[in-house]
Amino acid sequence: MTRQSATSVAPARAARPEWLVALVAAVVGLSIQGDSLMYGILPLAAEGLGIPLGLVGLLLSANRLVRLVSNTWASTLFERFGPRRPFIAAAILGFLTALIYGAGWGVIVFVLARMAWGIAWSGLRQGGYQAVWAGGPRVAGRLMGLLWGIIRLGSAISVVIGGWIFDQYGYRPAVLAIAGITALAIPLAWAVRWPETATHRPQPSSAKTTVKAPQKARSLEGWRVALADPAQRWMLFIGLQKLLFDSILVSTAALFLQQQLGSETPLAAFGIGIGTAAGLVLALRWLSDLVVGPLLGALSDRVGQLPLAAALVLGVLLAVIGAVMLSGVASLLCVALILVTSTGVNVTLDAAANRLSVTTPRPHLFIGAYTTVSDAGSAVGPLLAYSLGAATGFGALYLIAALIQAVAVTLFWLRSRQR
């Protein structure tokens, strides 16, 4: 049974949903900085750390692989105990994992830390989705854009500052400096007061089943609820493929930039090394969440999430074709366009999933299933990028992933118009 006392619940009128989402997003944005830094500097530092390049993809995916299980745990805990205590615990765990990245305790401990971060992220992201619930379905797109905008601002700060420290002082000082910033998430998480509107309760019969059933049965129940309707199944498939494409692109951005610029880059004249340059490219992706995400999220509330998402994925596909067919500066501009447009894709589709979740009997469990399939896509992305993509070139892999995304979202939109 849900324990009301375990959640610090304030009246819904005590705070605007924007403030709740902003505060929760700030916690997540601080906590994610250690993870984001790995995408910018781990591929560049791997050789010095004694990590084979092929293992980098596994390290970047380890946190996502564990989330295939931990998302169900997190959704069940949030449903049973409310968001307060699980969210605080996730912030503490996020800080500890960032600290371990810089400790230099070997590859095995590094892998364990990446897996622990996956568990932390399951809780942090669940809290973010529940904060968006507080505003209701009419502003889901705007609040989802606000959520991801602030979160990715944290990612952008991490890769730029951490990339600069890496260029100047090396890997360990960069990681430990960012770990110190993530510690600020803990008191902020403690300060969050969750309104009742952010804690959708399961039906009484469902809640009773949740307590008495063993963990395996609860997991199967979550998937049964999530797969019960054709629209929900389509939404889960789209969640899988959108982060497959996104993770391929983000996990290879540093190496792609290194290949494109090499030693002849004009950036060197300004004292900007490859670590800083890679951080700036990733920052473009994540800063666009802050500016583009809320704007497109608000637009999607007016025109509909699926029509806007369909237009955006077609734009991504055209930009990918340009990046593959063109060369030099033109190719890099197309890559920048892909990164920015992908922001809108993620925000609109996440908002669509969030709106769909509150129409299901068990909203927490549908979100758990949606985030799990999303994590499956994001886990496979780096593995493909550092195996198949490294052998054949990244262009063909970008093109195939973008084509799958465009077809899936467009078909889902067309089918939804017939319902």
Image (cartoon, rainbow, N blue to C red):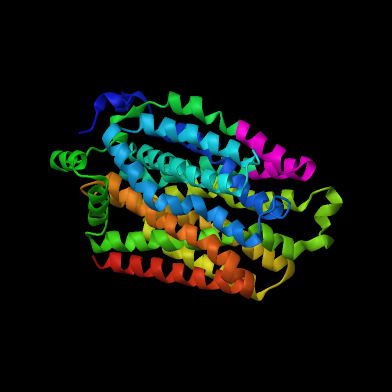
Furthest residue toward left = 205
Image quarter hosting the N terminus: top left
Quarter location, residue 249: bottom right
Furthest residue toward right = 269
Residue 290: image location, x then y, percent: 55, 44
170 part of magenta stretch: yes
Quarter location, residue 227: bottom left
Is 366 displayed left or right of 15 in the figure? left
Residue at image x 25%, y 68%? 418
- Front residue of 87/361: it is 87
Name the magenta segment's main secondary structure: helix
The answer to whether any part of residue 177 appears in the image is yes
Residue at image x 34%, y 23%? 14
Residue at image x 27%, y 55%? 223
126 part of magenta stretch: no
- Front residue of 377/9: it is 377
Is 8 displayed left or right of 113 in the figure? left
Q: Which residues are magenta?
A: 159-180
Residue 18: image location, x then y, percent: 42, 34
